[in-house]
Amino acid sequence: MAKVVLISGSPRKNGNTMQVLGVCKEEVEKAGLEVDLISLHDKSIRSCIACYKCVGSGKCSLDDGLNEIIAKVRPAEGLIVAAPVYFGTARGDLMSALQRIGMVSYNNDKFLSWKVGGPVAVARRGGVSSSYQEMLMFFFINEMIVPGSTYWNIIFGKQPGEALNDAEGINTVRRFAQNVAVLIKKLN
C-alpha cells in the first residue's frame, strides 16, 4: 500500500499545525493510502553541519532522531510537511530537518525525487506566504511533484483549535491532501 509521511514542525503536540495535518491524514486515508504522522514536538533537530558524512552512507551523522524519520520518508510515495510561522518564517527545526533530509537524499540515492507532496503554513496572521514559499523550495530542489489546490496551503489561527475554524484554509488543505493521494494513485 502506498504511504504518505506527514511531518509537523510544531513544538505543540496537539496545536494547530498538528490538527491541520490531522485533516490531511483523514483525506489521504479516505483515498486508501497509509499515513505515517510524525511530530517534531519531542525532538531537538539540529541544523546541518555540512560535514558531508552522509555522502555514500545514506544517513546523517547527527544522532538526534532524524535518521529514523529519513527511514520512514525514503520508501514513502508522498510527503506533506506543516510548520507554524514564527516571526514571519517557518519554524527553524522543521527547516533544519528538511535541509538535512534533502542533503541525505541528494548525496545518495535521491530518494525524494518523484515523491508527491508539499507544504502547509499555519500562522496567526503574517508570514504565511513567505513561509509557504520557503518550504516549497525544498520540494522543487529535490525534484518532487507538488499538486495544487484551490488556493495556497495557508491556514490562520493562534490558539490551539482556531485553525480548524478557518473554513477556506481547511477546504484548501483538504483538497490539497486529496490531490496528493489522487496523484500518487495515478503514478502507481
Image (spheres, rainbow, N blue to C red):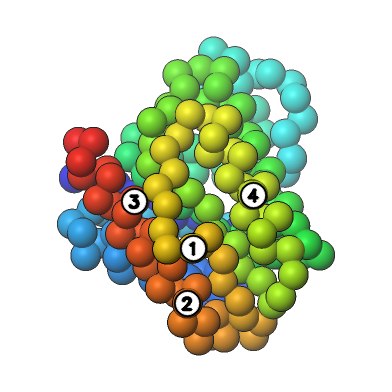
Amino acid type at mark 3: Val
Task: Answer with mark 2 or mark 3, whichever residue precedes in sequence.
Answer: 2
Secondary element under disc 2, as helix, strand or loop, is helix
Q: For label 1, count other residues whose C-alpha is less than 10 Å away and answer few (under 14), some (14-19) or many (20+).
A: few
Q: CA distance from mark 4 to mark 2?
A: 19 Å
Amino acid type at mark 2: Glu
Which mark is drawn over residue 151? 1
Q: Residue at x 30, y 65 (%)?
A: 27
Image height of 47 relative to 122, above or below: above
Q: Residue at x 48, y 29 (%)?
A: 143
Q: Label 1 near label 2: C-beta < 8 Å? A: yes
Secondary element under disc 1, as helix, strand or loop, is loop
Q: CA distance from mark 3 to mark 4?
A: 18 Å
Camera-nearest residue between 61 and 79: 79
Amino acid type at mark 4: Gln
Secondary element under disc 4, as helix, strand or loop, is helix
Q: Label 1 near label 3: C-beta < 8 Å? A: no
Instruction: Give the residue pinned by disc 4.
Output: 133
Task: Answer with mark 4 or mark 2, whichever residue precedes in sequence.
Answer: 4
